Amino acid sequence: MSNNLPANPKAALETFINDIEKDYHKRYKSLAFKNQLFYFLFQWAVILSAFGTAILAAILNEDQFRGWGAGRIVLVTLPSIGALATSALTQTHVYDRWRLRDEGRRAFKSLINIGKQLYAEAGESAPRCSEIHSYLVQMVNRIENKQSIDFFTKELNNKEDAAKQESGSQGSNEKKTSQK
């Protein structure tokens, strides 16, 4: 056996709880933070570009709209930035991913707390430590599976919703055409 593996059930349980904390919880915390940051940055890009465009359009005079001066270039560029940020937000479903990963982070934090509580209650009982370890392994697998299913279910639902909207808009166009 490797020297890295714990020699008894209590040590194995302690190692596993620490692994949940430093691997799973840390990863989900990082993913949630990155998605949150991406969401807020792009939201602010949309807001500021819309606001900046409105202000700039209001203060530019008619002469500044002629030719390709700095004001006109910025007036064209700002809405483009807003459109790009809006597209990135909607196409990547970053808010949904942020919510999903934050749910995973909270689930792992809860599991760590439960694991530590059960660890303390188990004392030196090897059978109880093995039982708790097995339970925590099952719960980690359950959380990971739920994350995977929820992620891909959300992606599939988004594609189905887009297809329904597309077919619905075509159907309403056909009705309008047939009514004429």
Image (cartoon, rainbow, N blue to C red):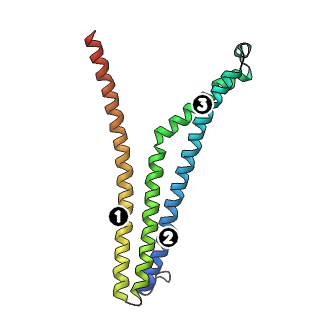
Q: Residue at x 51, y 56 (%)?
A: 31
- Residue 17 is situated, as x and y percent measured from the top left of the image, at 46, 75
Q: Residue at x 47, y 46 (%)?
A: 95
Disc 1 versus disc 2: distance between alpha carbons?
16 Å
Q: Nearer the viewer, mark 3 or mark 1?
A: 3
Which residue position is annotated with label 2? 21
Mark sitting on residue 164? none
**Type of amino acid at the residue the image marks with label 2:** Glu
Q: Residue at x 44, y 87 (%)?
A: 7
Which residue position is annotated with label 1? 142
Mark with earlier residue (1, 2): 2
Q: Tell me the quarter of the picture where residue 123 sits.
A: bottom left
Around disc 1, counting alpha carbons within 10 Å, would you say few (fewer than 14), some (14 to 19), or many (20 or more)?
A: few
**Type of amino acid at the residue the image marks with label 3:** Ala
* Residue 28 sits above or below residue 64 on the image: below
Around disc 3, counting alpha carbons within 10 Å, would you say few (fewer than 14), some (14 to 19), or many (20 or more)?
A: some
Q: Nearer the viewer, mark 2 or mark 3?
A: 3
Q: Quadrant of the N terminus?
A: bottom left
In this image, 32 relative to 73: left or right? left
Quick check: can you spot residue 77? no
- Residue 63 is situated, as x and y percent measured from the top left of the image, at 74, 13
- Residue 71 is situated, as x and y percent measured from the top left of the image, at 72, 23
Mark with earlier residue (3, 1): 3
**Type of amino acid at the residue the image marks with label 1:** Arg
* Residue 95 sits above or below residue 66 on the image: below
Mark sitting on residue 50? 3
Question: Secondary structure beneath disc 1?
Answer: helix
In this image, 57 relative to 3: left or right? right
